[in-house]
Image (cartoon, rainbow, N blue to C red):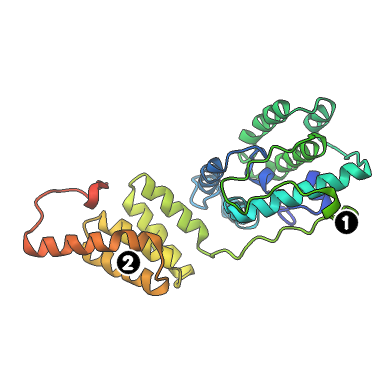
Amino acid sequence: MGKPENFKIDKGLASFGISDHYAILGLSMTTEAAQIRKKFLKLAKILHPDVFGRTSEEKEIATKYFSKMVSPAYQVLNSDRERGEYLATLRMFAQGQKQKGTTPTLTSEIAQKLQRLPHEITYQQFVDQISPKQYENLESILEYTAALSELNLVYVLTQSSLGFTTGSSAASATPIPASSATLNHEPAVTKPPTQSPALRNLNMAELFIGKKQWTDALKELISAEKLDPNNAKIYALKGVVQMNQNAAAIAKASFQKALKLDPKEPTALKYINQVSTSIAQAAAKPAEKKGGLFGWGKK
């Protein structure tokens, strides 16, 4: 199996120097913000190195797809502010290209079809056709991502009013008037924010916590701690897992460590008083009920 040279695409929006975060995640540009995280967790699971049946080389490639493409795209689209700035860049780009009368060069048949019949409904239908196939095979990821980026290019150049979903943040983008934009220059490439080297493990841990698979979640968090030992969120999530394994004292210590690293860590702040109360109650009267604390249940 040949390794991708750079884990990047060079068609569609990417051919203009724009990182196509939506194409990378296999999402249309009209996707609701709440669906972005759901798709990211699905891709994190698909590209996890422990997927059965992959060779060592395939595991390495899957990991790089996640770290070099999927994770940076998610970091931008999951933030209201970052997503708003990114969509503003796309609006400015579209205005500039329309003023120039740009006719995009398209290689995929499906993007050519959309160019002949440009409509938001058609666009969504075509994205839905490609997206399920995108990550089925490591060898075809770049090909399908490029096709999605060509669809996105057609969409931004043919829609008179771009119906992007920006979420509820006040920092989300609003249309930029042509008079206020420098239309003769291509927009700068959006730089993804710095990310934790343990991001994959954190996201998988959250996925396991959501399924109440405490043992699997703890394994991911132990691995995460080795990669990023000063990340408060790791210890906060360890606390959640430990309190649901009836290890209240250890959970309290994890929450305390999280708050030492970040006094505002939300998960630790939410649960540390509850777990402290539980310890006090257990000291006064041993608990008789089985199962996890606070109604989480034990598994």
Of the residues under marks 2 and 1, which one precedes in the sequence? 1
Q: Which residue is mark 2?
A: 255
Q: Is residue 11 left or right of residue 67?
A: right
Q: Is residue 198 left or right of residue 257?
A: right
Q: Nearer the viewer, mark 2 or mark 1?
A: 1
Q: Quadrant of residue 154?
A: top right
Question: Does 148 appear above or below 245?
Answer: above
Residue 70 percent coordinates (x, y): 61, 51
Q: From mark 2 to mark 1, how far is it between C-alphas?
A: 49 Å
Q: Does dot 1 land on a helix, a strand or a loop?
A: loop
Compare residues 266 and 235 and report the one nearer the observer. Answer: 266
Q: Residues within 10 Å of mark 2 (few under 14, many from 20)?
A: many
Instruction: Point out the residue furthest to the right here.
Output: 100
Residue depicted at 37% across the width and 70% down the height:
259
Residue 9 percent coordinates (x, y): 76, 49
Type of the residue with mark 1: His
Q: Which residue is mark 1?
A: 185
CB of mark 2 within 8 Å of CB of mark 1?
Answer: no
Q: Is residue 102 left or right of residue 27?
A: right
